[in-house]
Image (tube, rainbow, N blue to C red):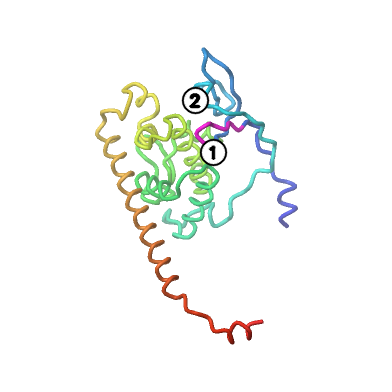
Amino acid sequence: MIGTLAAVAPLAHAAERATLRNGFAMQCDHHAAVDGRLRLYLSTGETNYIDLKPEEVADFEPVADAPAQPAAPAAQWAAADGRLSPTDLNQMLSSAGQEHNVDVDLLASVVKAESGGNAHAVSRAGARGLMQLMPSTAANLGVSDAMKPGENVRGGTAYLDQLLVRYHDNLALALAAYNAGPAAVDKYHGIPPYHETQAYVARVIHEFNRLVRAREAEAGRTQSTAVAAQVPVSQEATRSSH
């Protein structure tokens, strides 16, 4: 069955992978030299792009066409009330985070701030789903249905990854751009003087820090338990185990 699905799956659009000198990598549709900068076009059009200094990019390589990977059924649709199980949501965020090298706790913090984990959430401005993608943003990211949790998270993670690259891993600026748009961040050369955006950045970073501390504390407890459980193994027991 898996082989059959792979054979009939549609081919993904060919693109490029840009390897950056800071160790990150990002996917773009194509690139060009414009006014002494390298312009990375994030979609097939000419309006969605990131400008980088040539020395910031180490290499480009083509991304071969490959079958699009459908999300698992449990990760596609939420329950009737728009909620996913913690397991499904964590698996979804982990998968997207690994693909784009974005911390899963950061993604969880953004989801909490954007939608409270409600996959059916729609804002007054029309942003949709777990990571509250605007229709134009979703279209540029190749998200066909922002109300599907799996597509929404993949698109939102890709967008956050693009913003982190654009602002050189400055988390506060990337979050501000996610909330208010890159144009506002560029206009004010920093976090825009909007109360909503400033509160949003603070809320996400606070939650992210809380989750990281909890993860580190749990790792410390697990390590302590493992050390405490270690006991000398008798020579007889070692022999009898063979």
* 234 vs 209, nearest the viewer: 234
Q: Is residue 233 above or below residue 81?
A: below
Structural crowding at the residue carrying mark 1, measured as other residues with C-alpha within 10 Å and reported as few (<14), some (14–19) or many (≥20): many
| Most foreground residue, 183 or 240 | 240
Task: Find numbered disc 2 in the image and state the secondary structure of the residue it sits on.
Answer: strand
- Residue positioned 69% across, 41% down in the render: 66
Foreground: disc 2 or disc 1: 2
Q: Position of residue 111 (x, y in %)?
A: 40, 47
- Is residue 74 shown above or below 227? above
Q: Residue at x 49, y 25 (%)?
A: 50
Helix, strand or loop for disc 1: loop
The disc labelled 2 sits on which kind of residue? Ile
Q: Which region shows up in magenta?
A: 17-24
Kindly identify which residue carries mark 1. Answer: 143
Q: Residue 56 placed where, x, y %? A: 51, 26
Establish if 184 lies above or below 69: above
Task: Point out which mark residue 50 bears.
Answer: 2
- Residue 195 at what x, y percent from top left? 24, 34
Magenta stretch containing residue 191, yes or no?
A: no
Alpha-carbon distance for marks 2 and 1?
19 Å
Q: Residue furthest top?
A: 35
- Image quadrant in which you'd find residue 1: bottom right
On the rendered structure, is 67 left or right of 233? right
